[in-house]
Image: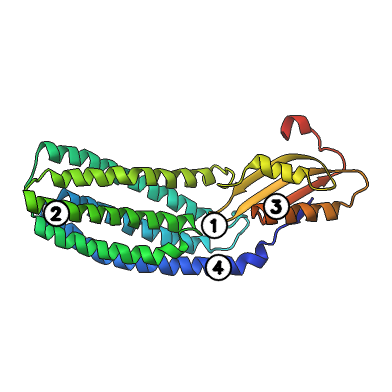
Amino acid sequence: METHDPAAEKGSAHSHVQNANSRQIAIALALTGAFLVAEVVGGIVFKSLALLSDAAHMFTDVAALTIALVAIKVGQRAADERRTFGYRRFEILAAAFNAVLLFGVAIYVLVEGVRRILEPEPVQSMGMLVVASLGLIANLISMRVLAGGKDKSLNVKGAYLEVWADMVGSIGVIGGAILIWLTGWSWVDPAVAIGVGLWVLPRTWVLLRDSTNILLEGAPTGVAVATLRKAIADTPGVADVHDLHLWVSGADQPHCSVHIVLAEAVDGDSVREDVATRLEAEFDVHHVTIQTERTPCDAHEELHP
C-alpha cells in the first residue's frame, strides 16, 4: 500500500488560517460579550420581548464564540496515538452544538412570542430603539471581523451565522420600536421576535446539515463521488476502481482512499502519482491514500462496491 499525503507541507498554512480565525473570533467575542449585559438590562427595564429575544441570541453568540475559540485551540493540537487525524473535528462538534443552541433559542422565542401576543404587555419603545441601535453597531463590526474566515472554516461560519442572526434581530427590533412609538401597538414587539425566530431557523438548519454530514463522514459538498470515481477509472493504466471512500475530517480537509487495479504492463508508482495529481487538480482533494493491485483484492464483489 502506498500513500500520497502532502499534509505536512500544508501544515504551516493550516496553522496560519487557524491563528487568523482565532483572532477574528476573539475580537467578535469581546464586542458581543461587552454588549450582552446592556441588552439584557435594556430588555428587562423596557419590557421588550423583542429586545430580550435579541439578547438571548446574543447570549448564544457569546457561548458559540467561546466554544468556537476553544475548538480552534483544541483543533491545533497535533495528531497522537489515539487521534490519528488530529483534533480538527472538534471544530465540527462545536459548529453542530451552536446549531442546536440556536434551534433551542428560536423555539423559545416562538413560544414566548405567541404568549405575549395573547397577553400583551406595555413596551418602552424609545429605550428599546436605543439599545437595539447600539446592538446593530456591535453586530456589524463583529460580522466584518468574521467575514474573512467564514468560507474557510465551518466553525467560523457558525459564529458568523450567529452574529448575522443577531444583526437581523437588531434591525427587526429597531423597526418594531419605531412602529410601536408611532402607533402604540404593543403586539408588534412579540411579532418581531417571532419573525426573527422564523428567519433564523433555515440558516441554522444549513449549519446543522453541513456539520452532521461531516460527522457522518459524508462526501464534501460540491464533490460528486460518481464523477470522482470516473476520473480515477479514466486515468491511463487503471483497469478497475473499488473500495472508494471520500470524507472530510475538518471543514476544509477532504480525504480520499481508494483501491485501483492496474492494467497489464504499467508502472504502479506512475499510475498512482497520476491519480493523486488528477484528484488534486480536478477535485481539490490533497489527502489521498491509494492501494494499487495487479488483481482485485479478496472479497471484492462482497466488500468493495
127 relative to 99 in the view: left or right = left
Q: Nearer the viewer, residue 91 or 172?
A: 172
Residue type at the position of mark 3? Leu
Q: Position of residue 283 (x, y in %)?
A: 65, 52
CB contact under 8 Å: marks 1 and 3: no
Residue type at the position of mark 2? Ala
Secondary structure, mark 3, is helix
Residue type at the position of mark 4? Ser
Q: Position of residue 188 (x, y in %)?
A: 14, 45
First of labels 1, 2 by sequence position: 1
Distance from Cα at disc 2 to Cα at disc 4: 45 Å
Distance from Cα at disc 1 to Cα at disc 4: 13 Å
Dot in front, 2 or 4: 2
Q: Callout 4: few (<14), some (14-19), or many (20+) C-alpha neighbours within 10 Å?
A: few
Against 175, residue 113 (above or below) is above
**Numbered circle sitting on residue 177:** 2
CB contact under 8 Å: marks 1 and 4: no
Q: How many marks?
A: 4
First of labels 4, 3 by sequence position: 4
Distance from Cα at disc 1 to Cα at disc 2: 45 Å
Residue type at the position of mark 1? Tyr
Q: Nearer the viewer, residue 78 or 263?
A: 263
| Residue under pointer 4 | 15
Distance from Cα at disc 2 to Cα at disc 3: 55 Å
Secondary structure, mark 1, is loop
First of labels 1, 4 by sequence position: 4
First of labels 2, 4 by sequence position: 4
Dot in front, 4 or 3: 3
